[in-house]
Amino acid sequence: MKRRNFLTLGAGAAASAALAACGTSGPAGGGGTAKAGEASYWFLSGPPGESVRTGAVERFNKANPNSPIKPTAFQNDAYKDKLKTALGAGQPPTIIWGWGGGGLKSYVDGGQVEDLTDWFGQNAAVKDRLFPASFGPATINGKIYAMPAETVQPIVLFYNKQVFADNNLTPPQSWGEIMDLVPKFNAKGIAPFSLGGQSRWTNMMWLEFLFDRIGGPSVFGDVFEGKANAWSNPLAIDALTKIQDLIKADGFVKGFSSITADSNADQALLYKGKAAMMLHGSWSYGIIQAQGGSFIKDGKLGYMNFPGVDGGKGDPNDTVGNAGQYLSISSKASAEQKDIAKKFFTSLLDDTEQSDWIKTGGVPIIKGADAKLASSPDADFLKFVYGVASNAKVFAQSWDQALSPTAAETLLSNISKLFTQSIGPQQFADNMNAVIGK
Protein backbone atom coordinates (compact mmCIF):
# COMPACT_ATOMS: atom_id res chain seq x y z
CA MET A 1 0.00 0.00 0.00
CA LYS A 2 1.11 3.57 -0.45
CA ARG A 3 0.16 6.73 1.32
CA ARG A 4 -0.46 9.38 -1.29
CA ASN A 5 2.20 8.80 -3.92
CA PHE A 6 5.19 7.42 -2.08
CA LEU A 7 4.49 6.14 1.41
CA THR A 8 4.77 2.36 1.49
CA LEU A 9 3.13 0.53 4.36
CA GLY A 10 3.66 -3.08 5.30
CA ALA A 11 1.14 -3.72 8.01
CA GLY A 12 -0.81 -6.44 6.23
CA ALA A 13 -4.53 -6.72 5.76
CA ALA A 14 -5.54 -5.34 9.13
CA ALA A 15 -3.44 -2.26 8.55
CA SER A 16 -5.89 -1.11 5.94
CA ALA A 17 -7.54 0.89 8.70
CA ALA A 18 -7.57 4.59 7.90
CA LEU A 19 -5.82 4.05 4.55
CA ALA A 20 -8.74 4.92 2.32
CA ALA A 21 -6.86 7.46 0.24
CA CYS A 22 -4.19 4.93 -0.62
CA GLY A 23 -3.67 1.79 -2.62
CA THR A 24 -1.36 0.36 -5.24
CA SER A 25 -2.08 -3.34 -5.09
CA GLY A 26 -4.19 -5.21 -7.57
CA PRO A 27 -4.19 -5.42 -11.35
CA ALA A 28 -3.90 -2.27 -13.37
CA GLY A 29 -6.96 -1.53 -15.41
CA GLY A 30 -6.80 -0.96 -19.13
CA GLY A 31 -8.53 1.61 -21.23
CA GLY A 32 -10.81 4.35 -20.07
CA THR A 33 -12.55 5.52 -23.22
CA ALA A 34 -16.27 5.95 -22.65
CA LYS A 35 -18.92 5.23 -25.23
CA ALA A 36 -21.60 7.69 -26.21
CA GLY A 37 -24.05 8.08 -23.34
CA GLU A 38 -21.60 7.03 -20.63
CA ALA A 39 -18.88 8.69 -18.59
CA SER A 40 -15.48 7.25 -17.68
CA TYR A 41 -13.92 7.27 -14.21
CA TRP A 42 -10.29 6.45 -13.38
CA PHE A 43 -9.12 5.79 -9.84
CA LEU A 44 -6.57 3.86 -7.78
CA SER A 45 -6.75 0.09 -7.44
CA GLY A 46 -6.06 -2.02 -4.40
CA PRO A 47 -7.61 -2.52 -0.98
CA PRO A 48 -9.36 -1.06 0.83
CA GLY A 49 -10.42 1.74 -1.53
CA GLU A 50 -11.00 -0.03 -4.84
CA SER A 51 -13.96 -2.12 -3.70
CA VAL A 52 -15.64 0.88 -2.08
CA ARG A 53 -15.19 3.03 -5.20
CA THR A 54 -16.38 0.23 -7.45
CA GLY A 55 -19.40 -0.33 -5.25
CA ALA A 56 -20.40 3.34 -5.52
CA VAL A 57 -20.23 3.11 -9.32
CA GLU A 58 -22.23 -0.11 -9.41
CA ARG A 59 -25.03 1.40 -7.33
CA PHE A 60 -25.08 4.48 -9.53
CA ASN A 61 -25.21 2.42 -12.73
CA LYS A 62 -28.04 0.29 -11.38
CA ALA A 63 -30.04 3.43 -10.65
CA ASN A 64 -29.05 5.09 -13.95
CA PRO A 65 -28.84 2.33 -16.59
CA ASN A 66 -29.19 4.80 -19.48
CA SER A 67 -26.32 7.00 -18.35
CA PRO A 68 -23.74 4.73 -16.74
CA ILE A 69 -20.17 5.28 -15.62
CA LYS A 70 -17.32 3.08 -16.84
CA PRO A 71 -14.77 2.60 -14.02
CA THR A 72 -11.10 1.75 -14.55
CA ALA A 73 -8.69 1.08 -11.69
CA PHE A 74 -4.94 1.58 -11.95
CA GLN A 75 -2.00 0.97 -9.67
CA ASN A 76 -0.59 4.18 -8.22
CA ASP A 77 2.39 4.88 -10.49
CA ALA A 78 0.63 3.53 -13.57
CA TYR A 79 -2.32 5.78 -12.83
CA LYS A 80 -0.19 8.90 -12.74
CA ASP A 81 1.63 8.00 -15.95
CA LYS A 82 -1.57 7.04 -17.76
CA LEU A 83 -3.40 10.16 -16.62
CA LYS A 84 -0.53 12.45 -17.60
CA THR A 85 -0.44 10.92 -21.08
CA ALA A 86 -4.22 11.10 -21.46
CA LEU A 87 -4.38 14.72 -20.37
CA GLY A 88 -1.58 15.62 -22.76
CA ALA A 89 -3.39 13.93 -25.62
CA GLY A 90 -6.70 15.60 -24.78
CA GLN A 91 -8.32 12.23 -24.03
CA PRO A 92 -8.65 12.06 -20.24
CA PRO A 93 -11.42 10.24 -18.37
CA THR A 94 -14.57 12.17 -17.59
CA ILE A 95 -13.96 11.90 -13.84
CA ILE A 96 -10.41 12.30 -12.54
CA TRP A 97 -9.55 10.93 -9.08
CA GLY A 98 -6.80 12.85 -7.30
CA TRP A 99 -5.34 14.49 -4.23
CA GLY A 100 -6.19 18.14 -4.93
CA GLY A 101 -3.62 20.82 -4.20
CA GLY A 102 -0.60 21.13 -6.48
CA GLY A 103 -1.70 18.44 -8.91
CA LEU A 104 -5.13 19.99 -9.25
CA LYS A 105 -3.57 23.42 -9.73
CA SER A 106 -1.57 22.10 -12.68
CA TYR A 107 -4.82 20.86 -14.26
CA VAL A 108 -6.45 24.22 -13.65
CA ASP A 109 -3.52 26.12 -15.13
CA GLY A 110 -3.74 23.91 -18.20
CA GLY A 111 -7.48 24.43 -18.61
CA GLN A 112 -8.01 20.68 -18.20
CA VAL A 113 -10.74 20.56 -15.53
CA GLU A 114 -14.15 22.13 -15.04
CA ASP A 115 -14.84 25.03 -12.70
CA LEU A 116 -17.44 23.61 -10.28
CA THR A 117 -17.99 26.78 -8.26
CA ASP A 118 -21.38 27.62 -9.75
CA TRP A 119 -22.48 23.99 -9.61
CA PHE A 120 -21.78 23.85 -5.89
CA GLY A 121 -23.62 27.16 -5.52
CA GLN A 122 -26.65 25.60 -7.17
CA ASN A 123 -26.33 22.39 -5.16
CA ALA A 124 -25.84 23.72 -1.66
CA ALA A 125 -27.21 20.52 -0.18
CA VAL A 126 -24.26 18.61 -1.61
CA LYS A 127 -21.68 21.10 -0.38
CA ASP A 128 -23.27 21.47 3.05
CA ARG A 129 -22.91 17.73 3.75
CA LEU A 130 -19.11 17.90 3.53
CA PHE A 131 -16.62 19.15 6.10
CA PRO A 132 -16.00 22.83 5.24
CA ALA A 133 -12.24 22.45 5.62
CA SER A 134 -12.18 19.73 2.96
CA PHE A 135 -12.66 22.34 0.25
CA GLY A 136 -9.21 23.87 0.79
CA PRO A 137 -7.29 21.48 -1.52
CA ALA A 138 -10.19 21.64 -4.01
CA THR A 139 -10.02 25.42 -4.31
CA ILE A 140 -7.64 27.18 -6.69
CA ASN A 141 -7.61 30.98 -7.01
CA GLY A 142 -10.84 31.18 -5.06
CA LYS A 143 -12.74 28.73 -7.27
CA ILE A 144 -13.72 25.11 -6.65
CA TYR A 145 -12.42 22.58 -9.18
CA ALA A 146 -13.01 19.27 -7.42
CA MET A 147 -15.52 17.35 -5.36
CA PRO A 148 -14.15 16.39 -1.92
CA ALA A 149 -14.79 12.68 -1.39
CA GLU A 150 -14.10 9.53 0.58
CA THR A 151 -12.31 9.94 3.93
CA VAL A 152 -10.24 12.25 6.12
CA GLN A 153 -6.74 11.47 7.42
CA PRO A 154 -5.34 14.05 9.83
CA ILE A 155 -1.87 13.89 11.33
CA VAL A 156 -2.10 12.87 15.00
CA LEU A 157 0.16 13.13 18.04
CA PHE A 158 0.17 9.58 19.43
CA TYR A 159 1.58 8.71 22.83
CA ASN A 160 2.16 5.69 25.02
CA LYS A 161 -0.09 6.07 28.07
CA GLN A 162 1.82 3.42 30.01
CA VAL A 163 5.15 5.19 29.55
CA PHE A 164 3.67 8.46 30.77
CA ALA A 165 2.00 6.80 33.76
CA ASP A 166 5.11 4.86 34.75
CA ASN A 167 7.09 8.11 34.84
CA ASN A 168 4.39 10.26 36.49
CA LEU A 169 4.24 12.57 33.47
CA THR A 170 1.33 14.02 31.51
CA PRO A 171 0.92 14.54 27.75
CA PRO A 172 2.04 17.97 26.52
CA GLN A 173 -0.49 20.76 26.08
CA SER A 174 1.92 23.25 24.49
CA TRP A 175 5.23 23.43 22.64
CA GLY A 176 6.86 24.56 25.87
CA GLU A 177 5.65 21.41 27.60
CA ILE A 178 6.99 19.30 24.72
CA MET A 179 10.44 20.80 25.24
CA ASP A 180 10.16 20.31 29.02
CA LEU A 181 9.40 16.60 28.56
CA VAL A 182 12.43 15.94 26.35
CA PRO A 183 15.13 15.86 29.08
CA LYS A 184 12.82 13.98 31.45
CA PHE A 185 12.33 11.09 29.05
CA ASN A 186 15.95 11.09 27.96
CA ALA A 187 17.00 10.78 31.60
CA LYS A 188 14.91 7.60 31.78
CA GLY A 189 16.47 6.14 28.64
CA ILE A 190 13.26 6.63 26.67
CA ALA A 191 13.21 8.50 23.37
CA PRO A 192 10.83 11.46 23.64
CA PHE A 193 9.68 10.99 20.03
CA SER A 194 9.87 8.17 17.56
CA LEU A 195 10.61 9.24 13.98
CA GLY A 196 11.24 7.42 10.71
CA GLY A 197 13.34 10.28 9.43
CA GLN A 198 14.88 8.57 6.42
CA SER A 199 11.51 8.76 4.71
CA ARG A 200 11.65 12.59 4.80
CA TRP A 201 7.87 13.19 4.64
CA THR A 202 7.66 12.09 8.27
CA ASN A 203 9.90 15.04 9.20
CA MET A 204 7.71 17.31 7.10
CA MET A 205 4.73 16.75 9.39
CA TRP A 206 6.57 18.50 12.21
CA LEU A 207 7.17 21.59 10.10
CA GLU A 208 3.58 21.62 8.88
CA PHE A 209 2.28 21.88 12.42
CA LEU A 210 4.90 24.31 13.66
CA PHE A 211 4.30 26.67 10.74
CA ASP A 212 0.57 26.51 11.42
CA ARG A 213 0.70 26.84 15.20
CA ILE A 214 3.21 29.70 15.10
CA GLY A 215 1.91 31.71 12.17
CA GLY A 216 -1.45 30.29 11.18
CA PRO A 217 -2.35 29.03 7.68
CA SER A 218 -1.21 32.16 5.86
CA VAL A 219 2.51 31.38 6.30
CA PHE A 220 2.50 28.32 4.07
CA GLY A 221 -0.43 29.81 2.16
CA ASP A 222 1.95 32.48 0.85
CA VAL A 223 4.23 29.73 -0.43
CA PHE A 224 1.37 27.96 -2.16
CA GLU A 225 0.21 31.20 -3.75
CA GLY A 226 3.73 31.85 -5.07
CA LYS A 227 4.60 34.91 -3.00
CA ALA A 228 8.27 35.79 -3.45
CA ASN A 229 10.55 34.91 -0.52
CA ALA A 230 7.61 33.48 1.43
CA TRP A 231 9.85 30.94 3.16
CA SER A 232 11.81 33.83 4.70
CA ASN A 233 8.82 35.02 6.71
CA PRO A 234 10.14 35.55 10.27
CA LEU A 235 7.41 33.22 11.53
CA ALA A 236 8.67 30.52 9.18
CA ILE A 237 12.23 31.03 10.38
CA ASP A 238 10.95 30.73 13.96
CA ALA A 239 9.33 27.38 13.13
CA LEU A 240 12.49 26.13 11.41
CA THR A 241 14.54 27.21 14.40
CA LYS A 242 12.24 25.49 16.88
CA ILE A 243 12.46 22.14 15.11
CA GLN A 244 16.24 22.32 15.19
CA ASP A 245 16.03 23.20 18.89
CA LEU A 246 14.11 19.96 19.40
CA ILE A 247 16.64 17.99 17.36
CA LYS A 248 19.59 19.47 19.28
CA ALA A 249 17.88 18.57 22.55
CA ASP A 250 17.71 14.91 21.43
CA GLY A 251 13.96 15.09 21.06
CA PHE A 252 13.98 12.24 18.54
CA VAL A 253 15.16 8.67 18.89
CA LYS A 254 18.88 8.23 18.22
CA GLY A 255 19.52 7.28 14.60
CA PHE A 256 16.15 8.58 13.42
CA SER A 257 17.60 9.62 10.06
CA SER A 258 18.29 5.97 9.22
CA ILE A 259 14.83 4.68 10.20
CA THR A 260 12.29 4.26 7.39
CA ALA A 261 8.56 4.65 7.78
CA ASP A 262 8.13 1.78 5.31
CA SER A 263 9.47 -0.66 7.91
CA ASN A 264 7.02 0.57 10.57
CA ALA A 265 9.96 0.58 12.99
CA ASP A 266 8.86 4.03 14.15
CA GLN A 267 5.49 2.60 15.14
CA ALA A 268 7.16 -0.29 16.98
CA LEU A 269 9.25 2.07 19.09
CA LEU A 270 6.04 3.60 20.41
CA TYR A 271 4.10 0.46 21.27
CA LYS A 272 7.17 -1.28 22.68
CA GLY A 273 7.74 1.60 25.09
CA LYS A 274 11.06 2.66 23.57
CA ALA A 275 9.59 6.05 22.65
CA ALA A 276 6.99 8.10 24.50
CA MET A 277 5.35 9.88 21.58
CA MET A 278 5.05 9.89 17.78
CA LEU A 279 3.65 12.37 15.26
CA HIS A 280 2.11 10.41 12.42
CA GLY A 281 -0.92 10.01 10.19
CA SER A 282 -4.19 8.61 11.47
CA TRP A 283 -3.46 5.48 9.42
CA SER A 284 -0.91 4.60 12.12
CA TYR A 285 -3.76 3.34 14.26
CA GLY A 286 -4.33 0.47 11.84
CA ILE A 287 -0.63 -0.37 11.73
CA ILE A 288 -0.34 -0.48 15.52
CA GLN A 289 -3.52 -2.49 15.73
CA ALA A 290 -2.11 -5.04 13.29
CA GLN A 291 1.41 -5.25 14.63
CA GLY A 292 1.29 -4.05 18.24
CA GLY A 293 -0.32 -7.09 19.82
CA SER A 294 -2.75 -6.09 22.56
CA PHE A 295 -1.34 -2.54 22.90
CA ILE A 296 -4.53 -0.84 21.73
CA LYS A 297 -6.85 -3.39 23.30
CA ASP A 298 -5.14 -2.82 26.64
CA GLY A 299 -5.85 0.90 26.42
CA LYS A 300 -2.22 1.98 26.18
CA LEU A 301 -2.48 4.12 23.04
CA GLY A 302 -3.19 7.80 23.56
CA TYR A 303 -3.82 10.38 20.84
CA MET A 304 -4.39 14.10 20.56
CA ASN A 305 -4.25 17.00 18.14
CA PHE A 306 -0.91 18.80 17.99
CA PRO A 307 -0.76 21.39 20.80
CA GLY A 308 -0.37 25.12 20.37
CA VAL A 309 2.80 27.17 20.56
CA ASP A 310 2.91 29.82 23.29
CA GLY A 311 2.23 33.19 21.66
CA GLY A 312 1.46 31.56 18.32
CA LYS A 313 -1.16 32.88 15.90
CA GLY A 314 -2.44 29.47 14.83
CA ASP A 315 -5.62 27.78 16.04
CA PRO A 316 -4.83 24.52 17.92
CA ASN A 317 -8.10 23.10 16.58
CA ASP A 318 -6.78 23.19 13.02
CA THR A 319 -4.98 20.25 11.50
CA VAL A 320 -2.90 19.04 8.56
CA GLY A 321 -2.82 15.87 6.49
CA ASN A 322 -5.22 14.51 3.90
CA ALA A 323 -8.44 16.51 4.06
CA GLY A 324 -10.06 14.12 1.62
CA GLN A 325 -9.69 12.72 -1.84
CA TYR A 326 -10.80 14.74 -4.84
CA LEU A 327 -12.80 14.15 -8.01
CA SER A 328 -12.59 16.57 -10.94
CA ILE A 329 -14.42 16.65 -14.25
CA SER A 330 -12.46 16.88 -17.49
CA SER A 331 -13.05 20.07 -19.46
CA LYS A 332 -12.77 17.88 -22.60
CA ALA A 333 -15.81 15.78 -21.65
CA SER A 334 -19.03 16.21 -23.58
CA ALA A 335 -21.93 18.07 -22.02
CA GLU A 336 -23.72 14.74 -21.53
CA GLN A 337 -20.70 13.21 -19.79
CA LYS A 338 -20.34 16.23 -17.52
CA ASP A 339 -23.98 15.92 -16.52
CA ILE A 340 -23.50 12.23 -15.69
CA ALA A 341 -20.45 13.07 -13.58
CA LYS A 342 -22.30 15.75 -11.65
CA LYS A 343 -25.22 13.41 -11.05
CA PHE A 344 -22.73 10.84 -9.75
CA PHE A 345 -21.28 13.45 -7.39
CA THR A 346 -24.70 13.94 -5.79
CA SER A 347 -24.91 10.19 -5.11
CA LEU A 348 -21.54 9.88 -3.39
CA LEU A 349 -21.19 9.00 0.28
CA ASP A 350 -24.71 7.67 0.68
CA ASP A 351 -25.37 5.50 3.72
CA THR A 352 -23.96 2.40 2.05
CA GLU A 353 -20.72 4.05 0.98
CA GLN A 354 -20.23 5.63 4.39
CA SER A 355 -20.62 2.23 6.03
CA ASP A 356 -18.18 0.70 3.55
CA TRP A 357 -15.50 3.28 4.37
CA ILE A 358 -16.06 2.84 8.10
CA LYS A 359 -15.53 -0.92 7.72
CA THR A 360 -12.08 -0.15 6.30
CA GLY A 361 -11.27 1.94 9.37
CA GLY A 362 -11.87 5.22 7.56
CA VAL A 363 -13.82 8.28 8.66
CA PRO A 364 -16.15 9.55 5.91
CA ILE A 365 -15.86 13.20 4.95
CA ILE A 366 -19.57 13.67 5.68
CA LYS A 367 -21.02 15.76 8.51
CA GLY A 368 -22.91 13.51 10.89
CA ALA A 369 -20.91 10.41 9.98
CA ASP A 370 -19.95 10.16 13.63
CA ALA A 371 -23.37 8.69 14.36
CA LYS A 372 -22.38 5.68 12.27
CA LEU A 373 -19.06 5.13 14.03
CA ALA A 374 -20.45 3.75 17.28
CA SER A 375 -20.78 0.22 15.91
CA SER A 376 -17.10 0.05 14.98
CA PRO A 377 -14.75 -1.73 17.40
CA ASP A 378 -12.48 1.29 16.92
CA ALA A 379 -15.24 3.81 17.62
CA ASP A 380 -13.28 5.91 20.12
CA PHE A 381 -10.42 6.58 17.73
CA LEU A 382 -12.68 7.11 14.72
CA LYS A 383 -14.78 9.59 16.69
CA PHE A 384 -11.59 11.41 17.64
CA VAL A 385 -10.58 11.65 13.96
CA TYR A 386 -14.07 12.84 13.07
CA GLY A 387 -13.89 15.50 15.78
CA VAL A 388 -10.52 16.78 14.59
CA ALA A 389 -11.65 16.96 10.97
CA SER A 390 -15.07 18.45 11.62
CA ASN A 391 -13.88 21.05 14.12
CA ALA A 392 -10.94 22.27 12.07
CA LYS A 393 -11.57 25.60 10.37
CA VAL A 394 -8.47 24.83 8.33
CA PHE A 395 -7.44 21.32 7.30
CA ALA A 396 -4.15 22.05 5.57
CA GLN A 397 -3.03 19.68 2.87
CA SER A 398 0.27 17.86 3.20
CA TRP A 399 2.90 20.12 1.68
CA ASP A 400 4.27 17.59 -0.77
CA GLN A 401 0.81 17.31 -2.31
CA ALA A 402 0.04 21.01 -2.15
CA LEU A 403 3.20 21.92 -4.08
CA SER A 404 4.22 21.02 -7.62
CA PRO A 405 6.28 17.83 -8.03
CA THR A 406 9.42 19.92 -8.64
CA ALA A 407 8.98 22.06 -5.54
CA ALA A 408 7.91 19.05 -3.47
CA GLU A 409 11.11 17.13 -4.22
CA THR A 410 13.22 20.18 -3.37
CA LEU A 411 11.23 20.52 -0.15
CA LEU A 412 11.78 16.93 0.93
CA SER A 413 15.48 17.11 0.12
CA ASN A 414 15.95 20.27 2.17
CA ILE A 415 13.85 18.95 5.05
CA SER A 416 16.22 16.00 5.24
CA LYS A 417 19.18 18.37 5.39
CA LEU A 418 17.47 20.52 8.01
CA PHE A 419 16.82 17.52 10.27
CA THR A 420 20.41 16.27 9.96
CA GLN A 421 21.50 19.85 10.67
CA SER A 422 23.62 20.09 7.52
CA ILE A 423 21.78 23.34 6.80
CA GLY A 424 20.21 25.93 9.08
CA PRO A 425 16.85 27.73 8.94
CA GLN A 426 18.00 30.57 6.68
CA GLN A 427 19.71 28.26 4.18
CA PHE A 428 16.56 26.14 4.10
CA ALA A 429 14.49 29.25 3.39
CA ASP A 430 16.87 30.44 0.67
CA ASN A 431 16.84 27.06 -1.05
CA MET A 432 13.05 26.86 -0.96
CA ASN A 433 12.54 30.46 -2.08
CA ALA A 434 14.38 29.51 -5.28
CA VAL A 435 11.61 27.09 -6.32
CA ILE A 436 8.55 29.11 -5.34
CA GLY A 437 6.10 28.99 -8.22
CA LYS A 438 7.95 26.20 -10.05
Image (spheres, helix red, strand yellow):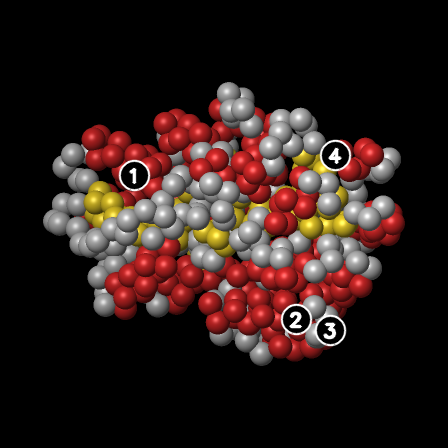
The kind of secondary structure element at disc 1 is helix
Residue at image position (21%, 35%) is 61
The kind of secondary structure element at disc 4 is helix
Nearest to viewer (mark 4 / mark 1): 4
**Residue under pointer 3:** 424
Q: Residue furthest top?
A: 375
Instruction: Assess whether mark 4 and mark 3 are in contact (beta carbons under 8 angstroms).
Output: no
Front position in the image: 157 or 340:
157
**Residue under pointer 1:** 54
Spatial CA distance of label 4 from label 1 is: 40 Å
**Residue type, label 3:** Gly
Nearest to viewer (mark 2 / mark 1): 2
Q: Is residue 218 left or right of residue 16?
A: right
Label whose residue precedes the other's in the sequence (2 or 1): 1
**Residue type, label 4:** Lys
**Residue type, label 1:** Thr
Label whose residue precedes the other's in the sequence (3 or 4): 4
Residue at image position (50%, 49%) is 9
Check disc 1: other Cα within 10 Å, few if <14, some if 14-19, many if 20+.
Answer: some
The kind of secondary structure element at disc 2 is helix
Q: Is residue 215 left or right of residue 142?
A: right
Spatial CA distance of label 2 from label 1 is: 42 Å
Label whose residue precedes the other's in the sequence (2 or 3): 2
**Residue under pointer 4:** 161
**Residue type, label 2:** Lys
User: Is residue 28 depicted above or below 150 in this figure?
Assistant: below
Q: Residue furthest left?
A: 36
Q: Is residue 17 visible to the viewer in this orientation of the structure?
A: yes
Front position in the image: 308 or 193:
193
